[in-house]
Image: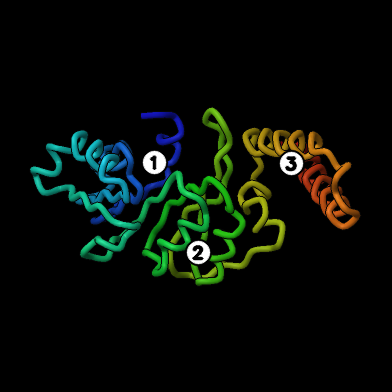
């Protein structure tokens, strides 16, 4: 299992029933079962070919009734409400589409649109317990929490992740530096005045957050 998947799995909690949505090879579902993080797991994927890989890896668990594979879009084919939902490697908008009903617990690793996902979760009354950026070959965001409890986020926390701001890490600092370099490489020559002003505002914002992060490391 890759370093990225291990870091995601570290945020799973022990529950009776887990759903690994978009499971691909099924490594995280296997990890959850082997480490007592669930009694049963549903592995789902919209791709039949991807699901076959998970079924091969989890063949013993499927035979034992501890795992069931479902070829479906998100959770649409899962026959029961799962205690925890794991979704990693999808865009934030895809995750929002899947989580029409929030589970009791969730672990989410969006590939993009993390800010939009945070806003959706808080707007639906979720309690976000972990909101970090980590490095595993490249930078990833991870959001974990509970479907009930309510939360409040500031505009900066929506944009950067609350834990990143309150308990900054070297990984978050590295992410900011990488984003700043990308922004500095953009050519402003073809931007209109409004777009240029927004680009400069965003760059200044990232630089300010990086400065605060480095002070608190």
Q: Which residue is mark 3?
A: 213
Q: Residue at x 31, y 46 (%)?
A: 47
Residue 142 appears in the rendering: yes
Q: State the colouring used for the structure image.
A: rainbow
Residue nearest the viewer, comparing 171 with 204: 204
Query: Distance of mark 3 from mark 2, alpha carbons?
Result: 24 Å
Q: Which residue of the protein is positioned furthest toward the right in this rendering?
A: 193
SS for tag 3?
Answer: helix
**Circle nearer the N terminus (3, 2):** 2
Query: Distance of mark 1 from mark 2, alpha carbons?
Result: 19 Å
Q: Residue at x 53, y 45 (%)?
A: 111
Q: Are marks 1 and 2 in contact (CB under 8 Å)?
A: no
Residue 206 occupies quadrant: top right
Looking at the rendering, in which quadrant would you find the C terminus?
top right
The x, y position of residue 187, in whole percent, is 83, 38
Rendered view: 122 above or below 207: below
Residue 9 occupies quadrant: top left
Residue 103 occupies quadrant: bottom left
Binning the other alpha carbons within 10 Å of mark 1 as few (below 14), some (14 to 19) or many (20 upward) gives: some
The x, y position of residue 162, in whole percent, is 63, 54
SS for tag 1?
Answer: helix
Rendered view: 122 above or below 41: below
The x, y position of residue 195, in whole percent, is 83, 54
Q: Which residue is mark 2?
A: 127
Q: Which residue is mark 1?
A: 9
Q: Residue at x 15, y 48 (%)?
A: 66
């Amino acid at each position: 299992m890759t370093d990225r998947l291990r870091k995601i799995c570290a945020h799973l909690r022990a529950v009776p029933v887990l759903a690994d949505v978009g499971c691909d090879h099924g490594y995280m579902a296997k990890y959850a079962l082997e480490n007592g993080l669930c009694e049963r797991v549903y592995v789902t994927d919209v791709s039949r070919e991807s699901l076959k890989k998970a079924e091969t890896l989890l063949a013993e668990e499927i035979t034992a009734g501890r795992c069931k594979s479902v070829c479906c879009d998100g959770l649409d084919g899962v026959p029961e409400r799962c205690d925890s939902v794991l979704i990693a490697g999808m865009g934030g908008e895809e995750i929002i589409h899947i989580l029409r009903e929030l589970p009791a617990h969730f672990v989410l690793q969006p590939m993009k649109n993390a800010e939009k996902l945070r806003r959706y979760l808080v707007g639906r009354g979720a309690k976000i317990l972990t909101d970090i950026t980590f490095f595993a070959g490249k930078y990833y965001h991870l959001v974990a929490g509970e479907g009930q409890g309510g939360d409040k986020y500031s505009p900066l926390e929506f944009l950067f992740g609350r834990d990143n701001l309150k308990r900054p890490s070297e990984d978050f600092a590295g992410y900011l530096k990488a984003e700043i370099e990308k922004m500095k490489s953009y050519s402003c020559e073809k931007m209109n005045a409004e777009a240029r002003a927004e680009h400069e505002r965003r760059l200044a914002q990232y630089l300010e957050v990086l400065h605060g992060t480095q002070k608190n490391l």
